[in-house]
Amino acid sequence: MNEVKYTYQRTKEDFMQHSIWHRLFRTKYAIFLNFFMPILAIGMVIFSFESIDEFTGILIAYLILFPIVNYLMVRYGVNRMFKKQNLEFDVTTFTYNEEGIGISSPKGDLTLEYNRVHKVYVTSKYIYIYLDRQNAFLVNKEFVGEPNIEAIIKMFNENLIPGTMVFKRF
């Protein structure tokens, strides 16, 4: 089995993309709330504009504004976090091999076995490796290269415990 090794330091853009992905796109429920419901609400406005009462109008406005407010809240939170003076991201070296994922930074070393991985999402720019429902490692595909990305995905497919899935999304 191959070993894939790369060094990476997260940026504000990476953190922003991860936060937006986690909040707006990660689950089918989030996609439903952020995209299908506003389209349904706009359809309700178009086809029944004269017969909308006050409560229904407020509900429709909420459904239309929900994804916009959600997106703005994510951006505000990330921007506020990056304004802190003592914020720093370590340069981290990741090593993927048959033993697991080796993570090395100035703060210490860790080997994460594949059986600790909850889910893996593959998107056009990133791979999200979730350790539980909330916490994820982010792999920026630009820094790793396409042949290494395929090797990493192959390692996950071969080594993850049954029931753990590798999802490909947009």
Image: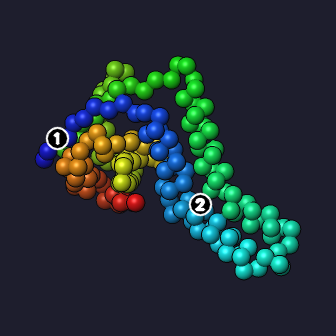
Q: Is residue 120 left or right of residue 96?
A: right
Label 2: few (<14), some (14–19) or many (≥20) C-alpha neighbours in 10 Å: many
Q: Secondary structure at mark 1?
A: loop
Q: Position of residue 147 (x, y in %)?
A: 19, 49
Taking 104 as reference, is 143 above or below it? below
Q: Secondary structure at mark 2?
A: helix
Q: Position of residue 46 (x, y in %)?
A: 71, 76
110 or 125: which is nearer to us?
125
Quadrant hosting residue 63: bottom right
Q: Is residue 131 at least partly visible in the picture?
A: no
Q: Quadrant of the C terminus?
A: bottom left
**Three-letter residue code for mark 2:** Asn
Taking 148 as reference, is 109 above or below it? above
**Three-letter residue code for mark 1:** Glu
Residue occupying image coordinates x 55% and y 50%: 23
Q: Earlier in the sequence, mark 2 or mark 1?
A: 1
150 or 65: which is nearer to us?
65
* Identity of the residue furthest to the left in this view: 1
124 or 116: which is nearer to us?
124
21 or 158: which is nearer to us?
21
Residue occupying image coordinates x 80% and y 70%: 56
Q: Is residue 65 left or right of residue 165?
A: right
Q: CA distance from mark 2 to mark 1?
A: 39 Å
How many tags in the picture?
2
* Identity of the residue furthest to the right in this view: 54
Q: Position of residue 128 (x, y in %)?
A: 39, 48
Circle 2 residue: 34
**Which disc is residue 3 wearing?**
1
Q: Position of residue 118 (x, y in %)?
A: 39, 50
Taking 119 as reference, is 7 above or below it? above
